[in-house]
Amino acid sequence: MSSTGNEATTLRTITTDIPARMDRLPWSRWHWMIVIGLGTVWILDGLEVTIVGNLSDALKSETGLGLTSADIGLAGAVYVTGSCVGALVFGQLTDRFGRKRLFILTLLVYLTGTVLTAFSMNPLYYFAMRFVTGLGIGGEYAAVNSAIDELIPARYRGRIAITINGSYWLGAAGGALLTIPLLNPELIPAWVGWRLCFALGAVLGVAVLLVRRNVPESPRWLFIHGRQDDSERIVSDVERRLADQDGVELDEPEGTIRVRQRRTVSLVRVARTVFADYPRRTVLCLALFIGQAFLYNAFFFTFGDTLQTFLGVGQTGAYIALFAVSNFLGALALGPLFDKVGRVRMISGTYIVSGVLLAVAGVVIGGLTAWTLTLFGMVIFFVASAGASSAYLTASEVFPLETRALCIAFFYAIGTAVGGITGPLLFGRLIESASAEQDITGIAVGYYIGAALMIGGGVVAMFLGVGAERRSLEDVATPLSAQDVDDG
């Protein structure tokens, strides 16, 4: 790496091969540390959302908080609103102060929120703590997805991002199974059991925090922000470890990039990048995020309530666990195809197929039992899981490095605000209205809306998708700092 100028006092224009060196690394134990330290946060999110979904009866009871079905939907909307706000606030800070500082901070915010939720004494306090917990999770989406894509070699990036985002469903399955004994009043008093459900999320969060301390800052972020020596040290340590411990002989890196270092990027520059420089990619990301956010937040936030209200289910844990396992297996099985078959084909295919299947479920829902509805959900979301994860992968790949976290946050917030807030509110109202007549077909309209949004997202991906598979991030979207060198 060559450079000019005085590093101690000024930012410089440098030429570096750090991206090429990272992309040519073979898979190693170091990469597994990244996956475990960063990827496990989605398990926390899945645990959190599933616990709340399974607690609907407990929270409605006198030993709970006396919530209604509409309140359950409102709590989901409040959680998602917090996620949107957290994504925007922490996303901007992630691009400015680094990935590591923020993925530590956002996890601490999550832990605070979920612990305090366990001490809820009234609905208002409960809603407030759901908002705080959402703040942390939203910030995690921006900070963690940025770091993962910048630390994982290009040829593995698609499958790893899809699988990590899909690990949400491991948490969902665990949360569903945990609620079975915790909500059994013969084992644990009813007023204690639902509170313990939230406390368990905090225990897992602390374990993740201990692992995460060892995850390094993104070398790509470091050399952009004037810390090329730290960037060099991190990559050299990984290369040395591969040579000494694994006996790997690395190929010579191919290509360098010349950048003008910077401390910050103005919001005006970010807006111009998103809306003026990459308008097609902006439309693509909005379509993908809105579709998957409505589909998941509408269906999954209220799935347990649907089973209990219309289909006579008491404990929903087993049903939701099966549903969650199918989601994770879908991401695990289909994830490698996003690198092999390609982004455009896989994204459009998973969105359109899952949308069509959801519409069919809406047509036949009146004749379904609890088990057949769950089976429908398993098939639909086996496909949809990989598609939903690809929305986060797309937003983190197709915009310049300096705007990556904020772009993820922006699309997550807009898509989730449209689909993730309106979805639970709509389904909560639909369930409450349909329950008066005990007619489950009253919620079918929600399925049709979700199907239309998913199919629409798939069609947009067919025409506007970006073939980012096996390509360097800097090749998919030139960093602003490199554009500055060209402009200069």
Image (spheres, grey):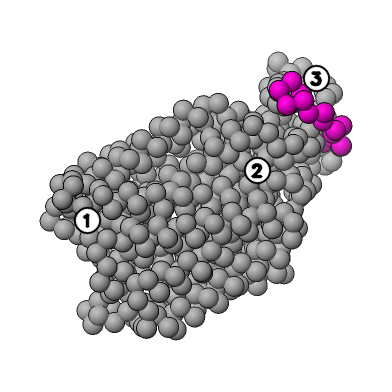
Q: What's the distance in space between the residues labelled 3 and 1, CA to CA?
A: 62 Å
Question: Which amino acid type is shown beneath numbered disc 2?
Answer: Asp
- Marks 2 and 3: in contact by CB < 8 Å? no
Residue on which the image places disc 3: 5
Mark nearer the N terminus (3 vs 1): 3
Q: What is the crowding at mark 1: few (fewer than 14 residues within 10 Å), some, or many (at least 20)?
A: many
Q: What's the distance in space between the residues labelled 1 and 2, CA to CA?
A: 39 Å
Using residue 7 as the reference point, say whether residue 361 is left or right of it.
Answer: left
Mark nearer the N terminus (1 vs 2): 1
Q: Position of residue 253 (x, y in %)?
A: 84, 34
Viewer-nearest of discs 3 and 1? 1
Report helix, strand or loop for mark 1.
helix
Question: Which amino acid type is shown beneath numbered disc 3?
Answer: Gly
Report helix, strand or loop for mark 2.
helix
Q: What's the distance in space between the residues labelled 3 and 2, CA to CA?
A: 30 Å
Residue on which the image places disc 2: 149
Question: Which amino acid type is shown beneath numbered disc 1?
Answer: Leu
Q: Position of residue 132 (x, y in %)?
A: 35, 43
Q: Which residues are magenta?
A: 243-260
Q: What is the crowding at mark 2: few (fewer than 14 residues within 10 Å), some, or many (at least 20)?
A: many
